[in-house]
Image (cartoon, grey):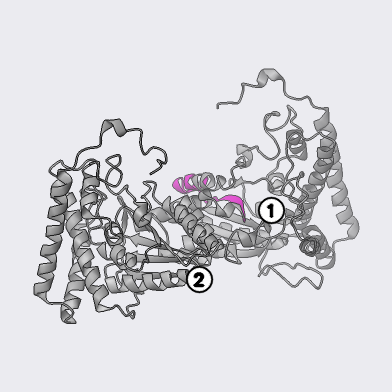
Amino acid sequence: MPEKTVAGKGSDRTVEVPVEARLKMLHYMKLVREIEDRIERKLYRQGKIVGGVYVGRGQEAISVGTAIHMVKDDVVAPSHRDMGVFLMRGVTPRRIIAQYMGRAAGLTKGRDGNMHMGDMDYNVIAFVSHLADNVPVSAGVALAFKMRGEKLVCLCYHGEGATSRGDWHEGINLASVHKLPVVYFINNNSYAYSTPTSLQYAIEDVASRAEGYGMPWEVADGNDIIAVYGAAKRAIDRARAGGGPSLVEYKTFRMTGHSAHDDAGYVPPELFEEWKRRDPIVRFENALIEEEAITPARIEEMQRECVAIIDDAVDWAEQQPYPDPADVTKGVYYDEG
Amino acid sequence: MANRSTHSAYAISAPAGLELDRVEMLELHYFMQLNRRLENRLGHLYRQNQVVGGLYSSLGQEACSVGSAYALEDGDFVGPMIRNLGAVLVRGVRPLDVVAQYCARAIGPTRGKDQNLHFGWVERGLIAPISVVGALIPVMAGVALEMKLHGKAQVALTYIGDGGMSTTDFHEGLNFAAVHKLPLILIVENNGYAYSTPTSRQAAVPDLAVRARGYGCHGEIADGNDVLAMVDVVRRARERCAAGAGPVMVEAKTFRRKGHAEHDDAGYVPAALRAEWERRDPLDAFRRFLLEEMDVAAADLDDIERKADEEVERSVEEALAAPFPDASIAREDVYA
């Protein structure tokens, strides 16, 4: 039986989050949900998406509440459930939809599908399908920062399944031995495809492995954006100040199958029910209303704004051409310009 | 804790509750002496160009190999690494087999087709070492899985160095063993250097055993230069494993007193560090223990050491008299 993941364990919510940042995070969480819903529930089913679709429904707080701390020249290596990272770094919804539709205007110019995209104009490293491969890659980025004496940080995301991979161990060890400015975020969404955490590792908090690397670690409720924000801030501030890498584990739940083609029949329905009550967006909206930081009317308006942004992105992307077959050899190796 | 003060003489004592009779203790003495004398003689053969390929010494680490293997039972499996000659001898491999193997003779375990300790002997519960450091861990986890699936109260034991602990296979293999609660004993032989990399550049923690917790398995630190401590810790680990409590990791603190291999002068190791560990010699310490604590007569120990020397000399003579493999067997043994 899959084990029950305890949400909120160890969460430290003492951090101060300016109202402006709160509202920005709410906007981006809603935008992530809207773009992913549109891709998964409409465009994919209409046959307009080329390839698979992997979304982070229920996990929006993690990418948004972490990426908000980045400064311009920081580098980020997101995983396939971190749409918020792309949007917060400034990648436009137009180009993201074009990417999913295999159009020439997509980030990979129609050559690769879905979240397999990066854009070094925004310091976003393309996701490597082999999960955990971005762990040593991020250590390398941070090594460059350290060697150049730059006060920059690399953020790296992966799931709990990836922690069982050898490159995870090798990358984390390298980062810890050399005290590199990198923060590893474990998006622990309780299932690695169909494998529950109880069959993935034999400990309670996988982030506790950090002790074996001499690294600080923290566990926070991944469905509580304030907890996400605080844990990320502490780790990023430490890395920027030369304190080395950290491991931050966010407990959350994958509210979909592994991908759009997976009905997740192996997940007990009561787990979905339980985690639906902890929806990170609804929770955050209620908290903001209670604090009188926002009105219900403004939230509705924000929702309409997100829908309009995505409507525009879809219209734009659909008008974009597919890649020209004559360009097929371009982009294989580094092209000047 | 493993590291005792080094300004006074290094001494070992019997761990509380360890049951070893006099005969067994003398057997431990014999195997450690055989291990050292055999490797010493192989060093001569290497310089005489009689050894084909590399020679990897376990000088100063004999107690770890001998003590850990000695704690096992019939039916258990060992996957030794390149420095675990002692474990191989304890499992019943003869010095003749070892010399013939190093000198690539047709009578050796791989019939002259592979070198040094790269051979297994399933009947003796020995899985062949894999050069790719760490790769034995998932293999031995597989051996342990078989034991668990068939309800055998046996264990699989393998070794890894401080350097091998940084590999992919270490992580994947140990995690698998921990999740499935397999009867696997992993001896982390922390000998201070992975080739020329000191442990401080290998891991950001002083005790590698602390990593056991990150997998949900039991971890212990032992003095790898104390053969009695090694027998004791592995016997206890064996009980845990055989009872179904999952894997155990033992960090044996020791030191590699020679280079990575015979061709390496290890000029990168500070002389003072090497001298400190010479004072902690596992064979000398055990000999003193037998003389002082067990009242064994020096003459008896001398006899055992002479017996080990004779065994080594006989083996060298016989091995060198044996032919190299005939070219006609080159294609045999490639597949099962």
Along the horizontal axis of the image, is A14 left or right of B318? left
Type of the residue with mark 2? Gly
Query: What residue is at 75 percent from the left and 73 percent from the top?
Result: B5
- Whether residue B180 is visible here, answered yes or no, is no
Task: Give the Cα separation between the discs numbered 2 and 1.
Answer: 27 Å
Query: What residue is at 17 percent from the left and 58 percent from the top?
Result: A34
Q: Is the residue A250 above or below the residue A50 in the image? A: below
Residue A111, percent across and down? 30, 39
- The answer to whether the residue labelled 2 contacts the one labelled 1, judged by CB atoms less than 8 Å apart, is no
Type of the residue with mark 1? Ser
Farthest-out residue, right: B299
Residue B27, percent across and down? 76, 52
Q: Which of pointers 2 and 1 indicates the residue nearer the eye?
A: 2
Query: What residue is at 33 percent from the left and 64 percent from the top?
Result: A67
Along the horizontal axis of the image, is A141 left or right of A20? right
Location of the C terminus of chain B by quadrant is: top right
What secondary structure is found at the residue carrying circle 2? loop
What secondary structure is found at the residue carrying circle 1? loop
Local crowd at mark 1 within 10 Å, few (<14), some, or many (≥20)? Answer: some
Location of the N terminus of chain B by quadrant is: bottom right
Q: Is the residue B269 above or below the residue B91 in the image? A: below
Residue B184, percent across and down? 53, 53
Along the horizontal axis of the image, is B208 left or right of A185? right
Residue B242, percent across and down? 52, 55
Q: Which residue is mark 2?
A: A243
Query: Can residue B316 be found in the magenta stretch?
Result: no
Q: Share a chain, discs 2 and 1?
A: no
User: What residue span does the magenta drawing correspond to?
Assistant: B143-162
Q: Which residue is mark 1?
A: B196
